[in-house]
Amino acid sequence: MVLALVVGGGVGLWWWASHDSLNLPESACWSILDQNDLRSLAGAARGTYTVRYGEHRGDENSLQPGLQNQTCTVEEDHHVLSGVTVRPWGKLTYHDVYEANADPAAKRQSDLGPDIQGLWEEHSRMRLAFLCDNPAAKLTHLTYLEVMVWGDSELVDPELPSVRQARLNTALKTAKTAASTSGCVNPIHFPAQAPGVV
């Protein structure tokens, strides 16, 4: 009887531990994010997360030049732990979102330097954009790149400073890679390290 309880308890503990653990990919989103980046976004999330790319995925191992929308999500059963989108924009769209401040709910991230504009939407999505001047972009008039980072609020509280900091860090890491991949000829001064969230 005692042996049956011990064995049963051990099996139950093993089952509970195997279903309660957090399994993250070692590398995600065009090899930009690692497990440390993802863990800081996980909060109390549990389960096995995989990387998925949007329909315009190109090479999943590297971010493509910014002439098309590219999206990557780290998710489990359609619950997104972290989503990243990189997209090209024209001057008018950039102006409407970042310069005209049309969205009163958005809060500026003011300490990203003179070349990067950043804002928080509803304290959950981090968006940043910058001028990326290159010959291909001039032909299409899509001379700006935007990076947006988000995640499902049922997995982690988007208001937590640690989560917001992790999303800002992810946005800046992705933006640096996007600037390099897209061949921006204009100088872009990224902050040496991600500033604290405001």
Image (cartoon, grey):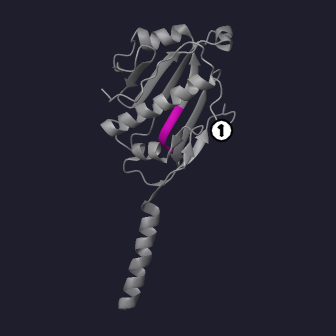
| Quadrant in which residue 135 is drawn | top right
Check if residue 61 falls in the magenta segment: no
Mark yes or no: residue 155 visible.
no
Q: Badge 1: how crowded within 10 Å, few (<14), some, or many (20+)?
A: some
Considering every residue shown, the one lying at the far front of the view is: 192
Q: Judge by depth and name the residue closer to the eye, 176 or 12.
A: 176
Q: Quadrant of the N terminus?
A: bottom left
Locate residue 90 relative to residue 191 in the image: left or right: right
Q: Quadrant of the C terminus?
A: top left
Give the overall secondary structure of the magenta segment: strand
Mark yes or no: residue 150 visible.
yes
Q: Judge by depth and name the residue closer to the eye, 102 or 128.
A: 128
State the residue at coordinates (45%, 38%). Answer: 151
Residue topped by disc 1: 60
Q: Is residue 18 above or below residue 159?
A: below
Q: What is the x, y in percent for residue 139?
A: 68, 9
Q: Secondary structure at mark 1?
A: loop
Q: Is residue 10 above or below residue 174?
A: below
Q: Which residues are magenta?
A: 78-84
Check if residue 82 falls in the magenta segment: yes
| Quadrant in which residue 70 is drawn | top right
State the residue at coordinates (42%, 67%). Answer: 16
Amino acid identity at mark 1: Glu
Q: Is residue 158 above or below residue 190?
A: below
| Quadrant in which residue 6 is drawn | bottom left
State the residue at coordinates (41%, 8%). Answer: 100
State the residue at coordinates (47%, 65%). Answer: 18
Q: Judge by depth and name the residue closer to the eye, 140 or 63.
A: 63
Q: What is the x, y in percent for residue 3?
A: 39, 89
Q: Judge by depth and name the residue closer to the eye, 139 or 181.
A: 181
